[in-house]
Image (cartoon, rainbow, N blue to C red):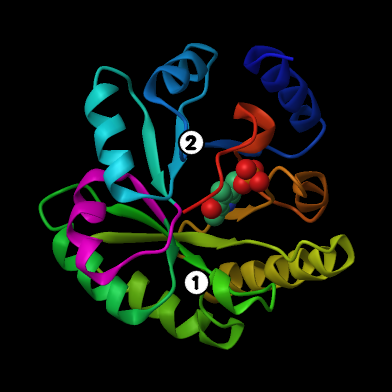
Amino acid sequence: MDLSQRLQQIQEELRSHAPCRLLAVSKTVPAERMRAAYALGLRHFGENYLQEALGKMATLADLEICWHFIGRIQRNKTGEIARHFDWVESVDRSLLVERLDRERAGLPPLQVLIEVAISGEESKGGCAIEGIFSLAEQIVASANLRFRGLMALAHPDPHVAARNFAQLSESYEQLQRHFPAEQIDTLSMGTSGDYPEALAHGATEIRLGTVLFGSRPKEQ
Ligand SMILES: *Cc1c(COP(=O)(O)O)cnc(C)c1O
C-alpha cells in the first residue's frame, strides 16, 4: 500500500470516533515525502530531533505546516524549540516551562502539552502523574504559553497500555474540571501500535509514524 491508501484507511477508522487529529510523525522522513503527505491533506507534523526538524522547516517553508515538537527536550535547545515550533508536546519539568515561556516572548503563544510518564518505563521520560497539577499551574500562569492538555507514550504490552490510557484520560478530565477557564482540549495518545485502543479511551490526537511512512531506520 502507498501513503495515500494507508492514509485513507486511517481516516476511515477515525470517522467513527469523536473528532481526532492525526499528527504525522515525520522523524527520519525526508522533506519530499512530507511534501507528498501534505499534498494528501496532512497539516500537522511531529518531529523529535531539533536539527533535523530545522532543516526540513527551511525546505518546506512554502507550506502551511503546523509543527509539533514531540521529542526529549534538552535544556540548551529550548530557545530554538520555542521560536520555531507551534506546539511542544513533551514538556515534563518546571525548568522547561520557565525557559520556553521566556524564549517565546514577542511571538504568538506556544501551545503546550505536558508529557506524562504512565508506562512505568523510566527511559521514556515524562512528568510523574503526581506532578501534573503543579506543572499545569505554572504553564497556565505563563504569558507566552497556552496549556492545551496531556501527551503520553503507553507501555508496549496491550493490557498495560489500556490501563495507561484510562489513567491518562482520567487525569485529563480532572484538569479540565480544575481549570475551567483554560482551553484544555488535547489528549494526545496512541501511536502506530496502539492507536485503536487510545481512540477507544478518548484520544483527541493520535501520533502516527510507522503506519503512515513505513518503518524507520533504527533510532539514534
Ligand atoms: C516516534 C514517536 C511516535 C510515532 O511512533 P510510531 O510507532 O512510528 O507510530 C509517536 N510519539 C512519539 C512521542 C514518538 O517519539
**Extreme residue in the right direction:** 159
Magenta part of the chain: 70-88
The residue that appears at 65% across and 39% down in the rendered structure is 20
Q: Is any part of residue 205 visible from this angle?
A: no
Name the kind of residue labelled 2 in the image: Ser
Instruction: State the CA–CA distance, disc 1 to disc 2.
Output: 32 Å
Left or right of 201, for residue 177: left
Which residue is more in the foreground, 79 or 31? Answer: 31
Q: Which residue is mark 1?
A: 179
- Residue 26, image x, y percentages: 48, 36
Identify the mark at residue 88; answer none if there is no mark: none
Whether 86 is among the magenta residues is: yes
Name the kind of residue labelled 1 in the image: Phe
Q: Is any part of residue 89 visible from this angle?
A: yes
Residue 27 lies, with reference to residue 152, above or below; the image says above
Residue 150 lies, with reference to residue 135, above or below; the image says above
Helix, strand or loop for disc 1: loop
- Residue 173, image x, y percentages: 66, 68
- Residue 181, image x, y percentages: 45, 65
- Residue 67, image x, y percentages: 37, 39
Whether 89 is among the magenta residues is: no
Helix, strand or loop for disc 2: loop
- Quadrant location of the N terminus in the rendered image: top right
Q: Which residue is mark 2?
A: 26
Circle 1 or circle 2, nearest the eye:
2
The image quadrant of residue 155 is bottom right
Residue 108 lies, with reference to residue 26, above or below; the image says below
